[in-house]
Each structure stands twice: as C-alpha cells, then as structure tokens.
Image (cartoon, grey):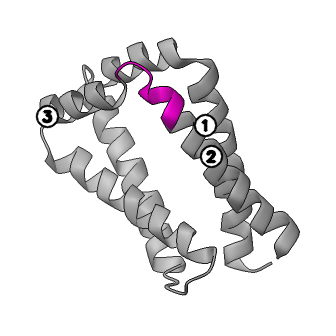
Amino acid sequence: MNLSIFLGRTVGLYLIITGFFYLLRRSYIQKAALQIFDNESFVIITAVMSLIIGLLIVVGHNVWEWKWTLTITLLGYLSLIKGLLRLFVPSHADKKILKKALAKDNPIYIGIVCLLLGLFLTYEGFFRA
C-alpha cells in the first residue's frame, strides 16, 4: 500500500471522528481544552506528540504536487508548527489563543472543517486510490 493512501485513510478517519467530537461535545471541549494548559506536563506531552507526528509526515510524505496528497503534507506541516509553538510559546499565550478559537460557535465550525476534510481524505484514500 502506498504511503499516501495509508495516510489518507488514517488521517481521514481521525478527522471524521474529531469532527463529530467537536460537533457533539462542544461544551465539553470548551471546558477541557482550557484545563489542559493548567498542567504543564500535559502541554509538553501534547507538544511532543504533535511534533513527532508532524515530523513523521513531513519527512516521510513531503509531496508538493497539486493533488489530494498535498493536503496530507500541509497537515503534517501544521502539526509540526503546532508542536513547536506549544514547546516554545508560553502556555498563557497559547491559552489566550485557544480561548478565542473555542469561543461561542467556533467549535461547530472547527468540527465542520474537520469532518469535510476527513471525508475528502477518506474518500481519496479508500475509493479513488
């Protein structure tokens, strides 16, 4: 199996699950996400996880063709940037950004974007490949 197909399927299914989670558990996410930054150990663990996932995708799947596989590469770079920011930006600044991102109805929009992106990648990975 091609790496692009594997990542399309895996990341696509992950985004579908995440999208439904954001849509169905909005108030839980708004409370829990802010509590993450009260625990420095958890911030470091999530930063390292994002960093590792981003590096794995960037190093293993650095495809810059104007096809669906570019989406995977861009998500890899976003994960890498997220990990770096969590490590090097003070957590109080990160908490402010997260408060704005999760304000009001924003989790609904995040959920819709995740769901659509997940459906796209899953379709490409399972049915078009």
Q: Is disc 2 placed on a helix, strand or loop?
A: helix
Q: Nearer the viewer, residue 88 or 41?
A: 88
Disc on the earlier residue, 3 or 2: 2
- Residue at the disc numbered 2: 15
Near-viewer residue (122 or 14)? 122
Residue under label 1: 18
Q: Amino acid at mark 2?
A: Leu
Q: In the image, which residues are magenta?
A: 103-109
Task: Please tell me whether mark 3 sits on a helix, a strand or a loop.
Answer: helix
Front in this rendered view, residue 128 or 13: 128
Residue 114 position (above or below residue 57): above
Q: Please give the name of the residue rendered at 14% of the width and 34% of the height, measured from the top-left corner.
A: 93
Distance from Cα at disc 1 to Cα at disc 3:
24 Å
Taking 73 as reference, is 2 above or below it? below
- Residue at left offset 32%, top offset 52%: 83
The x, y position of residue 9, in whole percent, is 74, 60
- Callout count: 3
**Labels 2 and 1 touching (C-beta < 8 A):** yes
Question: Which type of secondary structure does the marked residue at label 1 adopt?
Answer: helix
The answer to if 97 sits in the magenta stretch is no
Q: Position of residue 51 (x, y in %)?
A: 37, 57
Whole-angstrom CA distance, mark 3 to mark 2, is 26 Å
Q: Quadrant of residue 120?
A: bottom right
Q: Which residue is mark 3?
A: 93
Residue 78 placed where, x, y %? Answer: 39, 59
Amino acid residing under circle 1: Thr
Tell me where residue 1 sits by quadrant: bottom right
